[in-house]
């Protein structure tokens, strides 16, 4: 069937459609369902990738990373920079070092494979955190905004590590850094200019402009043996301000990503999870999950006290920052694609990443949820009092 | 008899029947009504913030439209009503809001879920009955 592109595409799109339907029905992220369906397809249906699927998946992960960067609220990051930078940096370094040490000295992984473990498990899922906070209304408070800003800093650490640790320090890297710096410097101005002059037309020049930048910087990153997600995230960060004001552009980019690109990425991410390796590595999976959660708790919780979070809010924040999903799988797949880790190690890492999306969230929601903030619609009339909003940091 | 009645509205036929019964009862008792819709299908464990935002916007739009119709229906009966959309787990949110807002009756439709969901997870009504501090009326 591989020679028939249309039938191959139909099979993959059928899996993607199935994931969408299950996701809507179950109220669980389509990304997670796509990974799980990918696991089933890879282990039981013999589905495998082709070069064009690999390209769509790679572009999907890049675009996903770009969107993640573009979702930051620049004003909020500026306002909370000091505590967010401190919490975010510690939230990256502690699990990174903890997981590298554990994978290398206890798990017996070689140094580079241990780095991939460290990067994969250092992440914090901004989206998981955001979804949980939405349920309490915490996303609209200053505390919530601070937590989200800290998550962005952690993810910045992750993409920087992925982009730098495996790069070749040669002329290509110098060229990549120089061009990236110049592009990032001029990009907000140029993007605004493109939108103002030719934006919101049916031929979508502004979307093509952003894709051009992502392809160009991704290509240079590849020449330097770096990773395309690094420039993608940085591009997203620097033009986040433009996206905040242009929801239509954001919606269009998201529609392109979620329809045609990210399903290929997440299905592929699941495809390489070998179920026998899950059983064989169960102890290591549990241990690495504990390392990730434990190192986040030990490092972040004291900082939440330092920045005068309430006790309950501090533990809640710490647990939410122990979550991970997108960047964790991207890092693990980078390791597998570049033969830094093998399929068994990839399986262990992706299983830990999925566990870290679910387990800390459940514990935080079940035992440490702070008092409720306001409802999402109009305030109630007199006599229908609501619970006090969460104290602001 | 009842002073403030909370109704859980999810857009299902059962929820609609519960609403009509509650409106009738509120008219008889001269009670206020609090109509709550819970955005329960926000994607857990999402990959991007946008995924959550889009889903929230979709659910919010759906419930706002539903609430506009419900407000007209109930106010035409001379009953005072307040409507809200909240995110979260339906049973927990309804029981919590009933307690916080001093409601003395919760009215719910019998089921909005599939038989399979019912078999494994029970109905929202079952869980509200377990958790509520006040009387619960389940309308079939």
Image (cartoon, coloured by chain):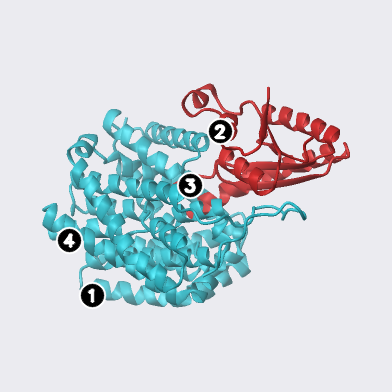
Residue B108 in which image quadrant: top right
CA–CA distance in space, label 4 to label 2: 47 Å
- Chain identifier, colour cyan: A
CA–CA distance in space, label 3 to label 4: 36 Å
Give residue A171's mark.
1
Residue A308 higher or lower than B84, as above or below: below
**Chain bearing mark 2:** B
Q: What element carries label 1?
A: helix
Q: What residue is rendered at 29% in x and 44% in y?
A: A351
Mark nearest the camera among 3 and 1 is 3
Label 4 neighbour load within 10 Å: few <14, some 14-19, many 20+: many
- Chain identifier, colour red: B
For the question of whether residue B42 can be seen, the reply is yes
Q: Nearer the viewer, residue A33 or B136?
A: B136
Residue tagged 3? A258
Q: Is mark 3 on a helix, strand or loop?
A: helix
Residue tagged 2? B130
Mark nearest the camera among 1 and 2 is 2
Do the CB atoms of the residues marked 1 and 4 lie less than 8 Å apart? no
Residue B98 in which image quadrant: top right
**Marked residue nearer the N-terminal end (3 or 4):** 4
Residue B19 higher or lower than A242, as above or below: above
Q: What residue is rendered at 60% in x and 59% in y?
A: A247
**Chain bearing mark 4:** A
Do the CB atoms of the residues marked 3 and 1 lie less than 8 Å apart? no
Hey, which residue is sitting farthest front in the picture? B1
Q: What element carries label 2?
A: helix
Give residue A101's mark.
4
Residue A152 higher or lower than A361, as above or below: below
**Marked residue nearer the N-terminal end (1 or 4):** 4
Q: Nearer the viewer, residue B130 or B34?
A: B130
């Amino acid at each position: 069937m591989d020679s028939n592109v249309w039938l191959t595409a139909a099979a993959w799109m059928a899996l993607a459609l199935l994931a969408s339907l299950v996701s809507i029905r179950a109220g669980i992220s389509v990304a997670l369902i796509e990974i799980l369906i990918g696991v089933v397809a890879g282990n039981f249906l013999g589905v495998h990738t082709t070069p064009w699927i690999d390209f769509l998946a790679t572009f999907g992960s890049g675009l996903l990373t770009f969107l993640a960067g573009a979702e930051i609220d620049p004003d909020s990051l500026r306002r909370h920079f000091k505590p967010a930078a401190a919490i975010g940096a510690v939230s990256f370094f502690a699990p990174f070092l903890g997981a590298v040490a554990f994978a290398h000295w206890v798990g017996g992984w070689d140094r580079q494979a241990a780095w991939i473990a460290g990067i994969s498990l250092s992440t914090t899922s901004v989206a998981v955190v955001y979804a949980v906070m939405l349920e309490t209304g915490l996303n609209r408070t200053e505390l919530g905004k601070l937590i989200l800003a800290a998550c962005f800093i952690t993810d910045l650490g992750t993409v920087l590590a992925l982009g730098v640790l495996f790069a070749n320090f040669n002329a290509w890297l110098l060229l990549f850094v120089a061009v990236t710096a110049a592009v990032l410097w001029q990009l907000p101005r140029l993007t605004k200019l493109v939108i103002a002059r030719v934006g919101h037309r049916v031929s979508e020049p502004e979307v093509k402009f952003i894709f051009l930048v992502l392809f160009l910087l991704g290509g240079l990153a590849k020449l330097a043996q770096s990773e395309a997600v690094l420039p993608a995230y940085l591009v997203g960060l620097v033009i986040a301000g433009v996206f905040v004001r242009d929801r239509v552009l954001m919606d269009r980019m998201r529609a392109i990503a979620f329809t045609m690109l990210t399903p290929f990425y997440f299905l592929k991410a699941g495809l390489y999870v070998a179920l026998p390796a899950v059983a064989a590595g169960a102890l290591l999976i549990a241990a690495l999950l504990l390392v990730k959660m434990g190192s986040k708790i030990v490092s972040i919780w004291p900082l939440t006290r330092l920045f005068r979070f309430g006790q309950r809010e501090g533990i809640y924040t710490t647990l939410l920052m122990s979550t991970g999903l997108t960047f964790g799988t991207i890092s693990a797949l980078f390791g597998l694609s570049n033969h830094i880790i093998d399929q068994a190690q990839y399986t262990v890492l992706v299983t830990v990443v999925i566990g870290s999306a679910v387990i800390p969230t459940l514990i935080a929601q079940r035992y440490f949820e702070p008092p409720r903030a306001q409802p999402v619609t109009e305030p109630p009339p007199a006599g229908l009092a609501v619970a006090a909003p969460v104290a602001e940091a | 008899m009842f002073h403030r009645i909370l109704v859980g509205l999810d857009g299902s036929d059962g929820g609609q029947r519960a609403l009509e019964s509650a409106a009738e009862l509120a008219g008889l008792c001269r009670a206020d009504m609090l109509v709550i819709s819970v955005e329960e299908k926000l994607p857990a464990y999402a990959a991007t913030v946008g995924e959550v935002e889009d889903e929230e916007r979709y659910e919010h739009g759906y419930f706002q439209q539903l609430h506009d119709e419900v407000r007209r229906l109930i106010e035409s009966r001379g009953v005072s009503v307040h409507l809200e959309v909240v995110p979260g787990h339906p049973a927990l949110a309804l029981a919590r809001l009933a307690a916080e807002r001093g409601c003395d009756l919760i009215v719910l439709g019998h089921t909005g879920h599939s038989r399979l969901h019912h078999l494994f997870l029970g109905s929202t009504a079952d869980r509200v009955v377990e958790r509520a501090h006040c009387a619960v009326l389940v309308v079939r």
